[in-house]
Image (tube, rainbow, N blue to C red):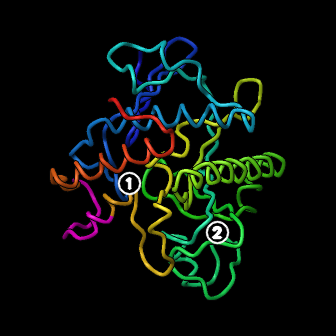
């Protein structure tokens, strides 16, 4: 197999007409890969994505061919996938105001061109979920764009279809998570086109790397929330004298252990399955 792409977390190999998507234990913050891995992270992301793909398949097809027909060395952290032409947009659905969306709202009352009601605070629940797309930068940081920008870039029909799919995936995921005591504040999705032109959900879905998960019993608007996702590592890194450029800092063992515990916790709460490694 040929390595054709190495991302911040995933490596992509070509295997005939298929791709092998391998989720590593690497962790990145502010687009910088940190030198310390989080044990089992790639396996948790893979297994949770597969769990979600099954539950979302009636909304839109996904890229999964097999989770077992993969090289033994990557078993548990690899998926055999369809080749797609990926769209140059990251589709972010938000149900709560936090992160970069909060910063934009505080500045001008909007997020990605969507006007929100006045008086919202950190972690406020939005009146309804909104789409706040970003660019998918090969280098540097992704930037907010408006829905109109997306429609101009990929076509109005495709933009409308994926807007509706993104919000439906978010709503279903949020409803299921709420039954298990978890708030999904926001999530990021990626889509591609199959050779026949059909739209396909790809990459990962509703994981602690692509979503913000909060325990519902600790939720309180107006302050930062207890995170069960990668935000915990971001928050730790923000306490350091680090300019957010490579090389990233080593992660202390207690932060590694606490991060791994959060990923396992959210996996077990969502799926109802005990993490067995």
N-terminal of the two: label 1 or label 2? 2
Neighbour tally class for label 2: few under 14, some 14-19, many 20 plus, Cα within 10 Å: many
CA–CA distance between discs 1 and 2? 23 Å
Q: Main secondary structure of the magenta part?
A: loop
Say which residue appears at 36% left-offset and 21% top-offset.
74
Segment tinted magenta in the rendering: 235-247
Q: Nearer the viewer, mark 1 or mark 2?
A: 1
Q: The residue tagged with tag 1: helix, strand or loop? A: loop
Instruction: Provide the residue designation for mark 1.
Output: 230
Say which residue appears at 62% left-offset and 54% top-offset.
174
Q: Position of residue 4 (x, y in %)?
A: 44, 26
Location of residue 275 with respect to 115 vertically, above or below:
above
Q: Nearer the viewer, residue 138 or 92?
A: 92
Q: Position of residue 222 (x, y in %)?
A: 48, 81
Location of residue 145 with respect to 105 vertically, above or below:
above
Residue 160 painted magenta:
no
Say which residue appears at 59% left-offset and 52% top-offset.
179
Say which residue appears at 54% left-offset and 82% top-offset.
121
Neighbour tally class for label 1: few under 14, some 14-19, many 20 plus, Cα within 10 Å: many
Instruction: Provide the residue designation for mark 2.
Output: 112
Which quadrant holds the C terminus?
A: top left
């Amino acid at each position: 197999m040929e390595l054709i792409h190495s991302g911040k977390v995933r490596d992509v190999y070509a295997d005939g007409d298929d791709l092998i998507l391998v989720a590593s234990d690497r962790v990145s913050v502010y687009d910088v890969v940190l030198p310390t891995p989080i044990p089992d992270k790639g396996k948790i992301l893979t297994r949770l994505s597969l769990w979600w793909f099954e539950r979302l398949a009636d909304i839109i097809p996904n890229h999964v061919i097999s989770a077992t027909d993969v090289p033994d060395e990557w078993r548990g952290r690899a998926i055999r996938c369809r080749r797609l032409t990926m769209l140059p947009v990251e589709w972010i659905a938000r149900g709560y105001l936090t992160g970069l969306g909060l910063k934009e709202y505080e500045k001008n009352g909007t997020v990605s061109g969507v006007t929100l009601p006045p008086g919202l605070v950190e972690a406020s629940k939005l009146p309804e979920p909104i789409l706040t797309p970003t660019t998918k930068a090969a280098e540097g940081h992704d930037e907010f764009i408006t829905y109109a920008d997306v429609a101009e870039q990929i076509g109005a029909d495709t933009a409308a279809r994926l807007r509706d799919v993104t919000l439906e995936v978010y709503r279903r995921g949020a409803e299921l998570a709420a039954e298990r005591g978890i708030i999904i504040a926001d999530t990021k999705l990626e889509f591609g086109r199959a050779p026949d032109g059909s739209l396909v959900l790809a990459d990962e879905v509703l994981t602690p790397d692509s979503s913000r998960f909060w325990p519902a019993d600790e939720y309180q608007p107006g302050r930062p929330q207890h995170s069960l996702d990668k935000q915990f590592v971001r928050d730790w890194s923000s306490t350091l004298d680090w300019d957010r450029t490579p090389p990233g800092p080593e992660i202390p063992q207690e932060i590694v252990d606490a991060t791994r515990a959060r990923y396992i916790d959210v996996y077990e709460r969502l799926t109802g399955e005990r993490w067995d490694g």
